[in-house]
Amino acid sequence: MPSLMEKSPNGVFQAHLSKGELAYQVCLDDNQPFFYPRLVAPVTGSTHIEWRISKGLGTVYTTTVVHYKGEPPLNVAMIDLDEGFRMMSRVDGIDAMQVKIGMRVKFKVHPATEKQAAYPVFTPLESAS
Amino acid sequence: MSIQTLSGLKRGSVAVVGAAESDLGQVAQGSTPLDLMAQASVRALDDCGLTLKDVDGLFVAATQVRMGPMALAEYLRIKPKYFDGTIIGGSSFMTHVAHAQAALQLGLCNVALITYGSTQRSVSRAAASPREFNPFESPYRPILPISAYAMAAARHMHEFGTTRENLAEVAVAARQWALMNPKAWEKEPLSIEQVLNARMVSYPFTVRDCCLVLDGGGAIVMTRADRAKSLKQKPAYVLGVGEALSHANISSMPDFTVTAAVESGAKAYAMAKVKPSEVNMLSLYDAFTITPILFLEDLGFCPKGEGGRFVSGGNIAPGGKLAVNTSGGGLSYCHPGMYGLLVMIEAIRQIRGECGQRQVNHCDIALAQGNGGVLSSECTVLFGSENTLS
């Protein structure tokens, strides 16, 4: 059983993110990817887990635009990564209402601020793909 | 799909014998969730002719009272033999019905009281139901639970061509029913245009696609069927129950257009030996306008993807094809945070035939669908009149 005394799944994820990497885990018993980071793999209960680095390419599964008073509209979206896991995120660099289901997107790091650790966001993938 | 029913539970073995709301809307400053629970509890006991001394099973869930059974037992100074504080959001109380049925059947208790109270309008939603921090969701600042349901609606629109007008139909139908319910919060008519043009909260939802934020609570009293017959009110027999958990956070919902009501409904139908076509009215947890659409599909009232078209043209409004949310629902009657108990109270009243102007003719079977979290927990209860037991 892996120990939690020196490092945690979330800690490993954040350490990768600080290097510009979007990390995810795969259970080596059933080869299923999963997200969010866990100490124990879902379904199998296995601790044979491998960290992998996503290529950072994905597709918008669904999207909403949140309206806070006195702020510009804010996108919140669910992204299906090509490696087979899903995460909540935001598509930046485009009007919030123009984020569409099925849109191809690419990962980048939203840098840390005083109040908020770094977190993954996405930008529209240019038609190059 | 193989259905794992709670095979020890017997169709019609227990009944809801008493039901009542607490005061609803905005209660006086200083009122507590426990005041509302106590008020609803004595009203529900009066309703059936039992007293606090008869209560030996206590079921409580509330966001403002972390250890509900303990807190209410202290307030009422009762010592229940059996208690359960399962909290899975707005469907907690349907789960309590299933668990109370098990306890009653086994003789672990004889009179079960299920109750809820909230002062979320008075103290604010943020204070009543603080969100847990989630490092993989909180940084994106979704307005939860609204944005989660909005993303389910957006996906439904994308896959099936559901429109914002279809969603608005749900709110308009709820309002039409509410105008026939003297206890409903909303008193003015509502049009599709008013829903569409209201303040946008989380696209595609305007504030009119979202449930009310009110104070309130309720209570129901359950006994075994033999005792139910001798009490004051017509019993609403528990024909079937089904419980299902899907996920906790919206990021982990497998398919945003299919809820665990597929599973909870199938369990309840199997236990009740009832088909959707035999259900006379539905009380569906309408936290947002998308939820009744999803539940109508998942509970077998229309094919997957057709829910938006099914609710349109006034089909679930008064005079429509199917009576849904006759109280006016969480959208127009009352939504005190975890609305599941009030969802059941309307179904119970329809079985009793005491809904006045909004009464559904010959209502022998009513379905109550609870929903908790962000489409996370789904629980179904089928209630039946005396006629369904023969």
Image (cartoon, grey):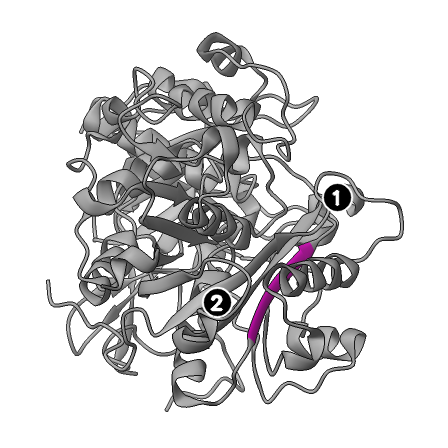
Find numbered disc 2 in the image and state the secondary structure of the residue it sits on: helix
Q: Which residue is mark 1?
A: B124
Label 1 marks a residue whose chain is B
Label 2 marks a residue whose chain is A
Does the magenta stretch mainly form a helix, a strand or a loop?
Answer: strand
Q: Residue at (43%, 42%) from the top-left corner?
A: A89
Within the image, what quadrant is residue B180 found in? top right
Q: In this orientation, does residue B313 appear?
A: yes
Residue B73: percent from the left, percent from the top?
72, 78
What is the crowding at mark 2: few (fewer than 14 residues within 10 Å), some, or many (at least 20)?
Answer: some
CB-based contact (under 8 Å), mark 1 and mark 2: no
Within the image, what quadrant is residue B306 found in? top left
Residue range (magenta): B112-117
What is the crowding at mark 1: few (fewer than 14 residues within 10 Å), some, or many (at least 20)?
Answer: some
Callout 2 amino acid? Asn
Q: Residue at (20%, 72%) from the top-left corner?
A: B4
Observer-nearest residue: B124 or B318?
A: B318
Callout 1 amino acid? Ser
Figure check: A102 above or below A49: above
Q: In this orientation, does residue A62 appear?
A: no
Q: Which residue is mark 2?
A: A10
Residue B179: percent from the left, percent from the top?
56, 23
Query: Alpha carbon of mark 1 to alpha carbon of mark 2: how far?
Result: 32 Å
Q: Left or right of B381: which side holds B79?
A: right
